[in-house]
């Protein structure tokens, strides 16, 4: 990403759950409304040359005395930055506990295949859930009146091996994208895929139609996420078991595209996919997702903003450890910083100008390029505005207003705020995850929302986590494309390269006499359907490869033309 992304708009939704004070719009804030909703992204910073306090470029803040007798301890009182006081007297991992990848994985998985690493997440328990609920849902459909030629009449119960192959085929479709599902089984035209060797198109479509991860008859009233909750809980528990977060944590959201009717569908104006289901993610090193939540709409919690609630729910197991949480401006607030400091956790993030308790002197100050203004609260929270190409408004509980000289990718020496540089490094955790998950998505427009969510967390989130572990444990650096190719081979099985068709075109006797398809088509052209139904001759021969009934003459005529 370029430095311009630092100032990109982060308008989240027309139904935005911001905790901004709608009545707080200080004078002179108009010029900040777009710029303050900025997000620092991965910069081209390559090395830190020196640190220095840039006095000449700093704008002095009004001298405000700190009143420690304030009755409400969560109301911030702002003053000049005082670097001599250590407000955060906690350190990271003071007890020296084991963090990072679970040591058992290092011991047992070295040299393992991609599928063996994916099996850490898609284990027997997950496959049992999918198989059980898919068979159950198919049975529920079969208990309803069906049309005579419904594909459900051919249903046979599935098993774990078939579901594994089914998921492998869906992943394959993401690598080899064709316009429609039927194109993967086409024998004519410009499309040529080997998928037909592993599963018949009718069986694949039937599994896609019945794919399920919950029992519809047990859905409690008002539970919007019941259809995927069981799968989500299983996968989250396996993610947490595989990785214990280190010092840096990043919270952000991704979107599963969905344009159908859904009560909690989100509209994201500036995203590639404007409509979809929103997932909040807690990411750590190399883009590993250690926890995630599906957003099902606003939930009223007295005295707690939605954005703050999301952060506290995702991180509650990892507080009181000296960690640092990086958030964008939808989450960051002084109130959230207070809550995290109470639990020995730092917060670093971009900040919206109209948040409650923001220091007015910082927000309202007009700066020239290179100037900085910052204030510190009585709890050690620093809010800083730095003018580069545009205004950058940041909050941190672990930084001051220090500037750092860095070298960009052009070899030029530039000065950047330490807060911005540190934020870019922390935010990269989720940026990597989002970038990789966007490659080769197998999702189709026609899927129901819960199937899209299930396939996304199985074949995207779980696969990316497996790749992170695979590269770390085996000390390799394979990309997502190669990793998925290896997974497809493991999940679908090996095949032999051959141009020979699986089934030979030849006449075979069938159990009953039916109209010849070629004769019938000719009669329809001559006199219409009723005429054809009355006079078309019947045959008890059919072609096993074409799955069509022919009379002897029409079989040879049709296949002679095809051979040419």
Image: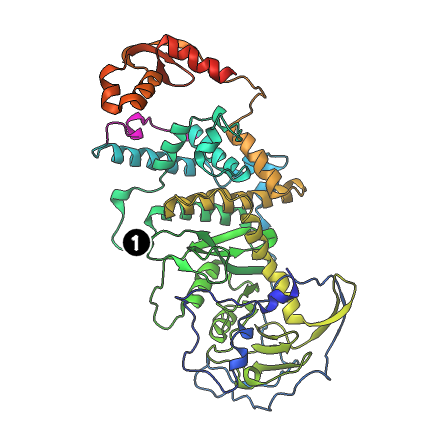
Would you say the magenta stretch is mainly helix, strand or loop? loop
Count the marks: how many? 1
Front residue of this view, candidates 349 and 339:
349
The answer to whether 344 appears left or right of 308 in the picture is: right
Q: Which residues are magenta?
A: 147-160
Q: Residue furthest front?
A: 526
Q: Is residue 474 above or below residue 316?
A: above
Q: Residue at x 44, y 63 (%)?
A: 310
Other-residue count near label 1 (Cα within 10 Å), few / some / many at <14 / 14–19 / ≥20: few
| In the depicted structure, whether residue 163 falls above or below residue 550 | below
Percent from the top left, x then y, of residue 292? 46, 54
Residue 99 appears in the figure: no
Q: Position of residue 353 (x, y in %)?
A: 51, 77
Residue 148 magenta-drawn? yes
Residue 265 coordinates in the image, percent (x, y): 38, 57
Residue 271 in magenta?
Answer: no
In-front residue for pair 219/91? 219
Instruction: State whether residue 154 is above or below residue 291.
Output: above
The residue identified by callout 1 is: 223
User: For the residue labelled by badge 1, is the local secondary structure a helix, a strand or a loop?
Assistant: loop
Out of 249 and 410, give the one closest to the viewer: 410
The x and y percentages for residue 191 are 52, 31
The answer to whether residue 533 shows anywhere in this view is yes
Instruction: Residue at 66%, 82% (x, y): give it.
Output: 368
């Amino acid at each position: 990403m370029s430095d311009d992304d630092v100032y990109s708009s982060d308008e989240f939704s027309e139904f935005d759950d911001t905790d901004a004070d709608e009545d707080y719009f200080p004078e002179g804030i108009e010029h900040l409304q777009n710029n303050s909703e900025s997000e620092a992204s991965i910069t081209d910073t390559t090395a830190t040359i020196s640190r220095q306090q840039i006095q000449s470029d700093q704008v002095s803040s009004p001298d405000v005395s700190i009143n420690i007798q304030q009755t409400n301890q969560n109301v911030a009182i702002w003053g000049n930055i005082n670097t001599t006081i250590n407000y955060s007297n906690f350190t990271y991992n003071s007890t020296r506990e084991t963090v990072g990848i679970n040591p058992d994985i290092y011991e047992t998985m070295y040299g393992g295949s991609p599928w063996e690493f994916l099996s850490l997440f898609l284990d027997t328990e997950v496959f049992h859930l999918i198989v059980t609920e898919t068979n159950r849902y198919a049975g529920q459909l079969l208990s309803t009146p069906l049309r005579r030629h419904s594909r459900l009449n051919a249903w046979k119960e599935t098993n774990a091996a078939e579901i594994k192959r089914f998921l492998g085929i869906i992943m394959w479709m993401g690598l080899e994208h064709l316009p429609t599902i039927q194109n993967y089984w086409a024998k004519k035209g410009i499309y040529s895929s080997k998928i037909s060797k592993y599963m018949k198109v009718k069986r694949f479509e039937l599994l896609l139609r019945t794919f399920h991860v919950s029992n519809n008859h047990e859905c409690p009233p008002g539970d919007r996420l019941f259809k995927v909750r069981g799968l989500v809980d299983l996968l989250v528990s396996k993610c947490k078991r595989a990785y214990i977060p280190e010092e840096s944590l990043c919270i952000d959201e991704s979107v599963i595209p969905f344009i159908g009717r859904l009560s909690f569908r989100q509209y994201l104006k500036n995203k590639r996919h404007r409509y979809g289901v929103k997932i909040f993610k807690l990411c750590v090193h190399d883009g590993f997702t250690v926890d995630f939540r599906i957003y099902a709409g606003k939930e009223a919690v007295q005295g707690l903003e939605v954005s703050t609630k999301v952060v506290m729910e995702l991180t509650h197991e990892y507080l009181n450890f000296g960690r640092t949480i990086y958030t964008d401006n939808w989450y960051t607030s002084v109130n959230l910083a207070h809550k995290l400091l109470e639990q020995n956790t730092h917060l670093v993030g971009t900040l919206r100008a109209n948040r409650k308790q923001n220091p007015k002197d910082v927000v309202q100050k007009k700066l020239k390029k290179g100037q900085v203004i910052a204030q510190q609260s009585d709890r050690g929270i620093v809010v800083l505005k730095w003018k580069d190409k545009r205004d950058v408004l940041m909050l941190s509980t672990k930084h001051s207003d220090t500037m750092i000289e860095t070298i960009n990718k052009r070899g030029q020496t530039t000065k950047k705020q330490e807060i911005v540089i540190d934020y870019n490094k922390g935010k990269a955790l989720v940026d990597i995850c989002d970038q990789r998950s966007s490659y080769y998505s197998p999702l189709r427009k026609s899927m129901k929302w819960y199937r899209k969510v299930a396939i996304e967390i199985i074949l995207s989130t779980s696969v990316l986590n497996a790749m992170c572990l695979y590269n770390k444990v085996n000390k390799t650096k394979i990309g997502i494309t190669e990793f998925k190719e290896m997974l497809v081979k493991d999940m679908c099985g090996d095949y032999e390269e051959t141009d020979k068709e699986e089934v030979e075109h030849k006449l075979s006797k069938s159990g009953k006499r039916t109209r010849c398809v070629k004769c019938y088509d000719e009669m329809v052209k001559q006199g219409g359907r009723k005429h054809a139904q009355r006079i078309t001759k019947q045959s008890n021969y059919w072609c096993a490869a074409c799955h069509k009934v022919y009379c002897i003459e029409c079989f040879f005529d049709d296949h002679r033309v095809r051979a040419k």
